[in-house]
Amino acid sequence: MNNQRQNSQTRVLVVDDSAFMRTALSRMVASDPDLWVVGTASNGNEALQKLPALDPDVITLDVQMPGLDGLQTLSRIMAEFPRPVIMVSSITSKDAETTFKALQAGAFDYVPKELSSTSLDILHLRDDLITKIKAAAESRQSHESLILPRKPPRAAAMPTREASAFTPAIVALGISTGGPKALQDILPTLPADLSVPILIVQHMPSGFTAPFAQRLDNLCAVSVAEAAHGEVVQAGVVYIAPAGSHLTVERGNSRTKICLSDKPENQLHVPSVDVMMQSVASAFRSLAMGVIMTGMGSDGAQGMSAIHREGGLTVGQDERSCAVYGMPRACAEMGILDRVVPLSQIPHEILLATRSRRASVS
């Protein structure tokens, strides 16, 4: 009976150089009946030695370790035993940068561990960790089920309205789980003379948005920055909402300003995709373009609905290219998406819709 129960569970390997963290993470994982810690490792070499025998479905991997660090270990895992890896990272600029490199190198996602002056606060990790492990396991199963039958990709949904009839003045983009890697894939393909601004809400903990924006800015032809309160929105700039603040816009006669606030307070996510998109819909009406991408939950469904209702253009990432098909699914089921496209086609949709937009936002 116990073997049957274990066979139905997601197998997890915990890798961390701290004995305390190995124990803490293992207990958190084991507290969920759908998950099974099949082993732990104190460093990258030990993890690689154990992988063939343990054959975990998902690995949690510390970013900073002696010997083979997290990035080097990840590289070996992806080359020799490819499977979803969740990075466990301290909130420091160095670790944040390494984490983003890991996502680019194939890590599924990450969870932050926050250091205080007295102790390591890990209790907040549990829900986030368990949710992401389950999403990672599901993504692996979905990927394998798609690969094995060798079926051709499903065609993108036909637009409910002609995209050529729209010339958006601004793009509002919402994204969550799987987002850092997805954004690192698509934003560098946008040209430096992009004729509209892009506002992005990426669910991310405090301490990560500024280094993430800096990393994207280094990778992209367009300018990328963490949004600042009172900043005038400019075409060709991508603004990342800072963690802990809602991002809205205030549109005047000749310029649009960014507003950051902790209001409204009744939101599951801060920043909230819904709050940002509803503000953009209200300010720009039919001149708004909404893009909803990979992520758990339904944040963005109300915001995309508002843009659609005002006559703006709405684009959703398709199921196959999503790390987690949650946020786009919610919008698709509401029937509010004008286009459903794979990740690689999202920049094309933005450029196609905005090709005649002049390099100014009124």
Image: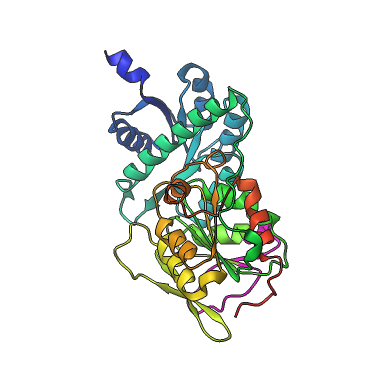
Residue 221 in the magenta stretch? The answer is yes
Give x and y (percent) for residue 351.
Answer: 68, 60
Q: Is residue 274 visible?
A: yes
Up-down: is 241 above or below 234? above
When asked about the image quadrant of residue 272, the answer is: bottom left
Which region is colored magenta? 217-237
Give x and y (percent) for residue 348.
Answer: 68, 54
Up-down: is 167 above or below 320? below
Give x and y (percent) for residue 138.
Answer: 45, 32
Which corner quadrant holds the C terminus?
bottom right
When asked about the image quadrant of residue 32, the answer is: top left
Q: Tell me the colour scheme of the image.
A: rainbow
Residue 341 in the magenta stretch? The answer is no
**Residue found 57% across the figure and 82% down from its top:** 255
Q: Is residue 45 left or right of residue 191?
A: left
Q: Main secondary structure of the magenta part?
A: loop
**Residue found 71% across the figure and 62% down from its top:** 221
Say which of 48 and 136 sits in front: 136
Which corner quadrant holds the N terminus?
top left
Q: Is residue 344 left or right of residue 245?
A: right
Say which of 196 and 136 sits in front: 196
Up-down: is 49 above or below 220? above
Give x and y (percent) for residue 283.
Answer: 48, 75
* Number of numbered tags placed on the structure image: 0
Q: Is residue 272 visible?
A: no
**Residue found 37% across the figure and 58% down from its top:** 269
